[in-house]
Amino acid sequence: ERPELDEEETKAQQLGKAYHVARLEPERFHDTYAREPSKQDYPAKGLLSSDAAVRAALKELGAQQTVTGETTAQRCERLLDLGYEGTLFPLELARFEDRRAGRIALPARYFDQITTDMERLRGNSEIADLLTGGFAEVSVFWTDSHGLKMKSRLDYLKPAAWTDLKTIEIREKELEAAISDAFRFNRYHVQAAVYRDAVEAIRVGGLQVRGEATDEQRALIAGIQIRPDELACWYVFTGKSGVPCLVAYEVEFFAVDT
């Protein structure tokens, strides 16, 4: 019985999901999201961006400003028929809606940021390798050695490794310090240990895929279960402000006597 999200929270969640899809499942991104037109995409000269501006232009050309039941896009069409040569932004928005085909609309500035981020990740062959050859958003449910019901959601799981994607603040910090602070203050070392337990529950605990799955997904789990050694753990960090950065960091696990 969670409270309903307000509009701004919903937008923030939607944007976060778009970033996640672009980074982890880029093949789905353009089928899932569409870039909204921006006024900055068109020459400023002759650009009409509001219904009032369209009606004023119709009046200037001696045409009727409004017709009963007429939409702004239809007024734009009449204006074009009268020889208007500029860009009619309401009409561009209407055309966008016609070709969106159910995809989620993202404001242009966010869409452009996300695609740049996606291209940067995929442009680094070593990091791209950590995010290919497996499956994104893998949920694991298991019972630990103390009888506790546990769950984890791995960003990316492949036969020999699992990867978690993080953003870090590196403004006025050296990169190593920024990564160290991220682990310390966000308790990524605790998260990593739980994720390790989840993957080990697959590898040695015999967890099976529940529900529908593709042959490739079942093959991934079967491949993990015949591995003699643990999977590698990688954290990929990308800077969210300041100097752009992209770095992969392998986390090593070791036992401490208590």
Image: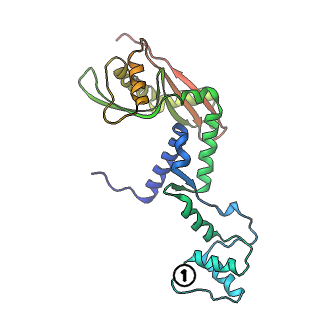
Between 36 and 239, the one lying in front of the other is 36
Between 74 and 129, the one lying in front of the other is 74
Place of residue 98 in the rendered image (x, y in percent of width and height, measured from the top left) = 55, 64
Graded by Cα atoms within 10 Å as few (under 14), some (14 to 19) or many (20 or more), the crowding at tag 1 reads few
Place of residue 171 in the rendered image (x, y in percent of width and height, measured from the top left) = 63, 38
Residue under the point 62% across and 66% down: 92
Place of residue 154 in the rendered image (x, y in percent of width and height, measured from the top left) = 43, 32
Give residue 243's quadrant in the image.
top right
Place of residue 90 in the rendered image (x, y in percent of width and height, measured from the top left) = 61, 71
Instruction: Give the answer, above or below, for where 44 lies relative to 36.
Output: below
Q: What residue is shown with label 1?
A: 70
Residue under the point 70% across and 89% down: 62
Outermost residue, left side:
147
Between 241 and 229, the one lying in front of the other is 229
Instruction: Give the answer, above or below, for where 2 lies relative to 227.
Output: below
| Residue 213 shown left or right of residue 169 in the figure | left
Residue under the point 59% across and 35% down: 238
Q: Regarding mark 1 in the picture, which secondary structure is present there? A: loop
Instruction: Give the answer, above or below, for where 106 lies relative to 159.
Output: below
Q: Number of labelled discs? A: 1
User: Which quadrant, please, contains the C terminus?
Assistant: top left
Residue under the point 28% across and 23% down: 144
Between 187 and 62, the one lying in front of the other is 62
